[in-house]
Image: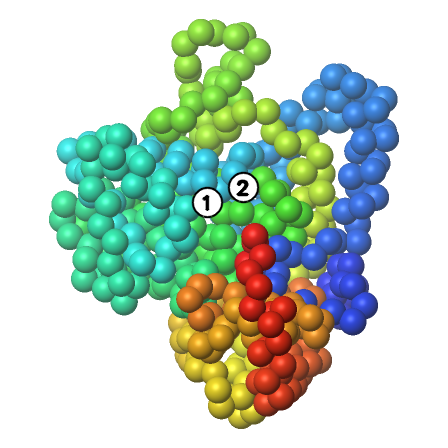
Amino acid sequence: MTDFAATRRAFHLPQGITYLDGNSLGPMPVAAHDRVARMMADEWSEMLITGWNKAGWYVQPRKVGDRIARLIGAGPGQVVMGDTLSIKVFQALSAALALRPGRRVILSDSGNFPSDLYVAQGLAHSLGAELRVVAPEAVKAAITDDLAVLMLTEVDYRTGRRHDMDALTARAHDAGALALWDLAHSAGAVDVDLTAADADFAVGCTYKYLNGGPGAPAFIWTHPRHADAAQPILQGWMGHDAPFAFDPDYRPAAGVERMRVGTPPVIALAALDAALDVWDDVSLADLRARSIVLTQAFIAGVEASCPDVTLNSPRDPALRGSQVSFCHPQGYAVMQALIAAGIVGDFRAPDVLRFGFAPLYNDLDDVERAVDGLARILRDGNWNDERFHQRAAVT
């Protein structure tokens, strides 16, 4: 049984703040400060360039990748870290397209994160492929025999709607296509099992529910059946079979190591490694059960006390990730008033109030405070203050 009181203590949660925005940026793990300071004082400061071998910086992307593998249903040596999520989407999608020569259709949905769609648009334009974007509920019917790659984010960033990874992957395979999954809103939030789903590629970020810090490196997973055949367009020296031979011609490394590109972000990986310590004693089944309890309680509380908002997430928890969205015509101003009151969620255009529930550190007290705060702001009209309507650069 997971001790969630202990996992909550593993994070620095500012006094007086109810934090429900871990689906954008997780809070700082208490251990991260000392881990990074130690890395800088004992490794970078004293070892200088010898730290690549002495401190194991070079193998960090594999070692940290193995820790994430357990959380997404992958095996040892199947996940590697580095670069940004958009770069990993580009690598995985280009490799998947290359594995389906003669097919040039990429299928995604309108709930996918825009950056993923931008990457797909760029690749489609440069390779003479076609990107088809359909409504989330129309994806299954849109999987046709000309499809090369199904590219979806498992949990919709606005609504929290969760795709059926097993069923859609199987449908893509029946059509002769490959399935690429973005786990940005899944890893660390829900019970992902890539192996059981028989997916082909997966990518994800680590600064949300995995709490790796702002700009923490992304991860990429390749199913073992593709690992030695995948040929991403973006080929970097760290993905070479012998990077320090400085061969002018690219020769891919074995397995998922070929998905490495540039020099790994060693300081950021140290912070992420510290963040992953808390997961050693966490059951993913317990995590998912707690997520459902929290999100169901929040929906019930808001609907009972806030008649001015409309649920924008699936009511059935089986169809939802670990976030809940409500709509309000003045959603931006309402969210700014909430944040000013110490209840931190976020806003997504045009009218979405978004609340992420991270089971590692959120509890039912957080739910109660958020419900009461939202009800008070809507009842008293606090959101109508002019300062809450002024748009910031990052909203």
Residue ID at (30%, 57%): 109
Few, some or many C-alpha atoms within 10 Å of disc 2 (few <14, some 14-19, many ≥20)? many
Residue ID at (61%, 43%): 215
The secondary structure type at the circle numbered 1 is strand
Few, some or many C-alpha atoms within 10 Å of disc 1 (few <14, some 14-19, many ≥20)? many
Residue 160's place in the image compared with 127, above or below, is below
Q: Do labels 2 and 1 touch, CB within 8 Å? A: yes
Quarter of image, res 208 = bottom right
Please state if 320 lies on the left or on the right of 296 as rendered: left
Q: Earlier in the sequence, mark 2 or mark 1?
A: 1
Which amino acid is tagged 2? Ala
Residue 388 appears anywhere in the view = yes
Which residue corresponds to mark 2?
218
Which residue corresponds to mark 1?
203
Quarter of image, res 96 = top left
Q: Quadrant of the N terminus?
A: bottom right
The secondary structure type at the circle numbered 2 is loop
Q: How is the image coloured?
A: rainbow
Q: Quadrant of the C terminus?
A: bottom right
